[in-house]
Amino acid sequence: MPAAPSISVILVCKNPGPRVKAALGSIWQQLHVHPEIIVVDGGSTDGSRAWLESQRERLTTLISEPDAGIYPAMNKGVARATGDWILFLGADDRLVGDMVLSESVNWMKKTEAGVAAGEVAYDDGRIYKLRSHVNPCARNFVRHQGTFYRRSLFAENDGFDPALAVMADYDFNVRLWKNRVRFKPIPLRIAACGAGGRSDSGRWQGYREEIAVRHRYFPFFRCLVWDALSLLRFARQQFSRRPTR
């Protein structure tokens, strides 16, 4: 039998407060799999850095220093990773159950795909999963909290674009898709995620970057309808935030 693939879990945070304890706890409790755990902390000043230092023996790598944002931090983690597959989490994310990595490994042993994507559930009830047939022009089609990437993809396709503050994962996913990397759905719920993160905030920057990424890879005429839908989603977000009397 082929050897079980190894997993690197990269957790990126800055001033996460007590949430990071739950996120790391969900990794530490995994059974039958001993993932490489890489924490990239952006120089926290809320006491989290001291706590992370106190847990250094339970981490494979701890990097704690100022950085330029989420995606530069994720790139730092990739540079230190040695696992066959990489999973990215934030301080608001928790792995679902103590067998989820073991079950994911069993699925990944059966596929030659470059990306294996499971289900992600947000605390506000939203659920995302990779569809069998995706339209990458529409919007981001996998959530990194539930997605395992072969580590080799980052050397072959470059990493996350640090010029993008919110949608560099969408950019990376489209780049892989354009380069004919295969995305494989796996029938597992991987992570539970807190609502209201930066990419989930409803701010214009996220929609602007989504439109910009779309135009990097697709012709103008193909983008028009999806650009309009992005603008409608932004308008709906703003309307829903208006105070009621």
Image (spheres, helix red, strand yellow):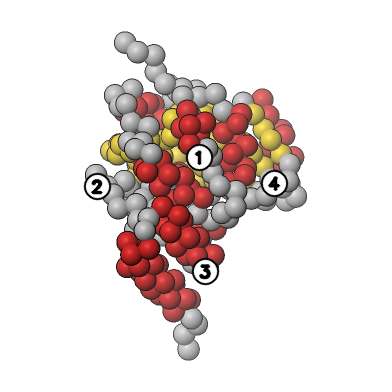
In the rendered structure, find residue 67 and report the number of the disc placed on it.
4
In three-dimensional space, the C-alpha distance between marks 3 and 4, rounded to whole angstroms, equals 23 Å
Q: Residue at x 58, y 55 (%)?
A: 165
* Kind of residue at disc 4: Asp
* Residue 10 left/right relative to 232: right
Q: Quadrant of the N terminus?
A: top left
- Asked whether residue 29 appears in the rendered view, the answer is no
* Kind of residue at disc 1: Phe
- Badge 1 is on which residue? 88
Q: Are marks 4 and 1 in contact (CB under 8 Å)?
A: no
- The residue closer to the viewer here, 213 or 132, is 213
- Asked whether residue 40 appears in the rendered view, the answer is yes
Q: Which is nearer the N-term, disc 4 or disc 1?
A: 4
- Badge 3 is on which residue? 204
* Kind of residue at disc 3: Trp
Secondary structure of the residue carrying numbered label 1:
strand
Q: Which is nearer the N-term, disc 3 or disc 4?
A: 4
